[in-house]
Image (cartoon, rainbow, N blue to C red):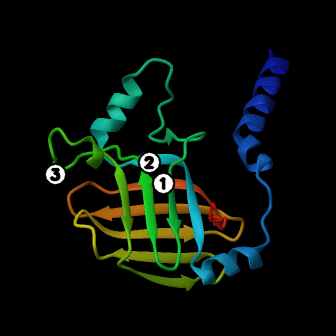
Amino acid sequence: MKKYISIIFIFVFLMIFQNSFAQTKVDPSTIAGIVDAEDFSFRAERATPTNYDVINVMNSLPNTTSTRMLDLAGSNYSIDLKKDKLEVYLPYFGRVFNPSYGNTDKTGYRFTSKDFLVSKTQGKKGKWIVKIKVNDQSTVDEIIIEIFKNGRAFTSIRSNDRQPISYDGFISKNIEEKEKL
C-alpha cells in the first residue's frame, strides 16, 4: 500500500510541475526591449472570471475540475499593442450590467483602438506593469498587463459595464506584416 501511495505522489508531483518544465526560458533583456518598444502581443492561455454564477456553472458541468480557470489554449485570443494601434480579441465570462440584446459582437472584448495611453513601470525583480488607458471605447476603462521576466504575463481588464476578469498567458514580439503586392 505504501508503494502505491508513493507512486501516486510522484505522479501528482510531475503533473503539477509539468507546465513549468515545458516552458522555454526567455532572456529578460528581450522582454525589456519588447516592453520599452511598446510593440508586443499578449496571448491568453487561461481566463479567470470573478462571477460566482459562472464558476458554479463551470463546476456543475460533467468532467470538469473544481477550479475557476477556463482553458483558452489553442485559441487565438490576444491583445496586440503597437505604437499606433491596440487590437483586443478576448472572451468574456461574467455579468454584463448593460447588455445589448441581439448583438453578439459585444459578448467579449473585441475592438481596435487608436486613442489610448500607455504607461509602464518596472519593479525590483524585473517585473513590468503596463497600464493601457483606452479613450475611444465606452466599455473598457483600463487594461493592466503584468509581465514577468520569463515572458509570462497576467492581464486584468477593468470595464465600465462588466465585472472584472483576468487572463493568464505570455507575451511575444509582434511580427511585422509585409505588404502584399
Q: Position of residue 155 (x, y in %)?
A: 48, 62
Q: Which residue is mark 3?
A: 97
**What residue is drawn where x is 48% and y is 54%?**
167
Residue tagged 1: 167
- Residue at image position (16%, 51%) is 97
Q: Earlier in the sequence, mark 3 or mark 1?
A: 3
Q: Please, what is the three-letter code of the amino acid marked with disc 2?
A: Thr
Depth check, front residue: 102 or 134? 102
Between 88 and 180, the one nearer to me in the picture: 180
Q: CA distance from mark 2 to mark 1?
A: 6 Å
- In this picture, residue 164 sits left or right of residue 76: left
Q: Earlier in the sequence, mark 2 or mark 1?
A: 2
> Answer yes or no: do the residues labelled 2 and 1 have beta carbons within 8 Å?
yes
From what the image shows, is residue 62 above or below residue 177?
above
Apparent side of residue 169 relative to residue 92 in the rendered image (left or right): right
Percent across and percent down for residue 90 are 43, 51
The residue singled out by tag 2 in the image is 48
Residue at (52% x, 64% y) in the render: 80
Q: In whole angstroms, how far apart are the C-alphas of marks 2 and 3?
A: 19 Å
- Label annotation for residue 76: none
Mark 3 is surrounded, within 10 Å at the Cα level, by few (under 14), some (14 to 19) or many (20 or more) other residues, namely: few
| Residue that sits furthest to the top in the current view | 1
**What secondary structure is marked by label 1?**
strand
83 relative to 105 in the view: left or right: right
Image quarter hosting the C terminus: bottom right
